[in-house]
Image (cartoon, helix red, strand yellow):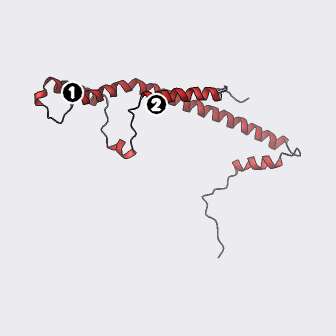
Amino acid sequence: MIANKVDTDFTDKDLKAVMDALETIREKLPFLVGLSVEERRRLSKLGRKSQTFTHQALDMATQHPELMPACLNLEEARRDMNLFVSLNPVLQVLSELQRLVKDTQTVAGSEAYAAARVAYASAKSMGKGLGLDDVVGTLSMRFDRTSSSTPAQTTP
């Protein structure tokens, strides 16, 4: 018997509702930016130690504005820090949701593929003479073991 860990109908209506909800989330976050791989690599990352440092340095700068250069905009820096902190729970929930969606999709695909292999094996062994030869032949191509990376031999 094939294990069936996921068994549901995800209707077009359900899909539309989820996509609408995701669009609402996107609309509520109009400030999101995209980075190239190179941009992401070049930016400093704010981990726990750097976060503590940033809080302390911004507090110190607020307490001693006379020591700060004119180019330092503390209000902007505080907004950036507040945004960083505020996005943490959003990122955690979205990361968990992404993992769950990906895992569920993997399980559903695996279950469907297992059922398809059972159907193929059954048709291959018991479908002879029933007009299934063409479809079984087409399906059997999935299991061909010829490597496309092997160079073709040429005759001189």
Residue that numbered label 2 is attached to: 26
Residue that numbered label 1 is attached to: 58
Task: Tell me which amino acid carries mark 2.
Answer: Arg
Q: Is residue 150 left or right of residue 43?
A: right
Q: Nearer the viewer, mark 2 or mark 1?
A: 2
- Callout 2: SS: helix
Task: Tell me which amino acid carries mark 1.
Answer: Leu
Q: Residue at x 81, y 49 (%)?
A: 134
Q: Quadrant of residue 79?
A: top left
Q: Are marks 2 and 1 in contact (CB under 8 Å)?
A: no
Quadrant of the frame with the N terminus: top right
Q: Quadrant of residue 64?
A: top left
Quadrant of the frame with the C terminus: bottom right
Report the Cα–Cα distance between label 2 and label 1.
30 Å
Residue, far bottom: 156
Mark 1, Cα crowd under 10 Å, few <14 / some 14-19 / many 20+, is some
Q: Residue at x 32, y 43 (%)?
A: 42
Task: Pinpoint residue 130: horizontal percent, then vertical percent.
Answer: 88, 44
Q: Which mark is residue 66?
A: none
